[in-house]
Image (cartoon, grey):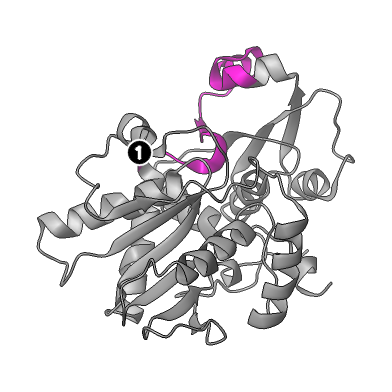
Amino acid sequence: MNLSNPFVLPSPITELDFIENSDGVKFYVKRDDLIHPYISGNKYRKLAYLLKGLVTDDIQGILTFGGAYSNHILATAAAAKLHNLKSVGIVRGDELNSRSNETLTLCEQLGMKLIFVNREEYRKKEFGTSAIELLKSEPDIYLIPEGGSNQMSMIGVGELLDEILLQMPQVDYIVVGMGTGGTMAGLVHRILERKDSEMLDKLINLVGVPVLKGIDFSEKLKNDYNLNHFDDFLSLENDYHFGGYAKSDDKLVSFKNQFEKDCGFPIDKVYNAKVAFALLDLNTKQFFRPGSKVVWIDTGGLRPNDYHS
């Protein structure tokens, strides 16, 4: 496992010229999945700014949470190793161990201490017994929420918006998947900042594609991230979850296979397959204004081997 790969920044933006549109709409993808083999996509954006601050503040380690296949857990383990920080991951499922799957094995190889807890304790997060005991015994451990989203991570994601505007100042729409809402929160926060400081030449439309059902993301952005005044530039497209988080069907699988042939690179099935499906479906419904430029952010989610399989 090689963590010394250089970070690919800014991540490239390439045109998806196979998507047909008679109204002059052009589609692009921001390849954040290429940033780093293990710390890529929105995980890099959320962790980068945060970890810089932790090293400066003399924090010695990180505690975070995730499921058995969590990209966040793996990215945190890799980022902590690069910054010479201890890392602890509390994992949902007390029946698991570090050999249960590739993700957990990689985390252990990267030096992360894995603590496996039952579902009831996991739901308590930092108020669970294991987390409380660890934070008491090691006060120099910093707590990162499940998924990596907090006020600090929004700043890192905000830099993603700045990067896109430097690469493509004429962008009209930015499309991104939503799970915890942290990536969208960072984009919304940065647009509001740039509006207030008159650093936007025009208002950019954000399009969020929730990959799970039953969550009011507008309220989540307000309540969890203390954001408001985004209704004039944010659209939430709630019809592309395919049954819920990590759920799929034959239609999505078939679409993903064909889309990967058309675009020439793999996409993950949990987030980006659903976002790509939404992108093409919204195109057929003439959702985007004629002549506009649309950038979809590929937020990663694959392992290095997935690019060669």
**Which amino acid does the dot numbered 1 rest on?**
Ser
Q: Is residue 299 left or right of residue 50?
A: right
Badge 1: residue crowd in 10 Å (few <14, some 14–19, many ≥20):
some
Residue 48 x/y as whole percent: 47, 55
Q: Is residue 182 left or right of residue 86?
A: left
Residue 2 visible in this rendered orientation of the protein: no
Q: Quadrant of residue 159?
A: bottom left
Residue 291 visible in this rendered orientation of the protein: yes
Q: Is residue 214 left or right of residue 228?
A: right
Q: Residue at x 24, y 57 (%)?
A: 191
Q: Quadrant of residue 243?
A: top right
Is residue 140 within the magenta segment? yes
Residue under pointer 1 = 218
Q: Residue at x 70, y 58 (%)?
A: 252
Q: Is residue 140 left or right of residue 220?
A: right
Quadrant that contains the N terminus? bottom right
Residue 40 x/y as whole percent: 58, 62
Quadrant that contains the C terminus? bottom right
Is residue 309 within the magenta segment? no
Q: Nearer the viewer, residue 289 or 163?
A: 289
Q: Main secondary structure of the magenta part?
A: helix
Residue 293 x/y as whole percent: 36, 78
Q: Secondary structure at mark 1?
A: helix
In magenta, the rendered stretch is 123-151
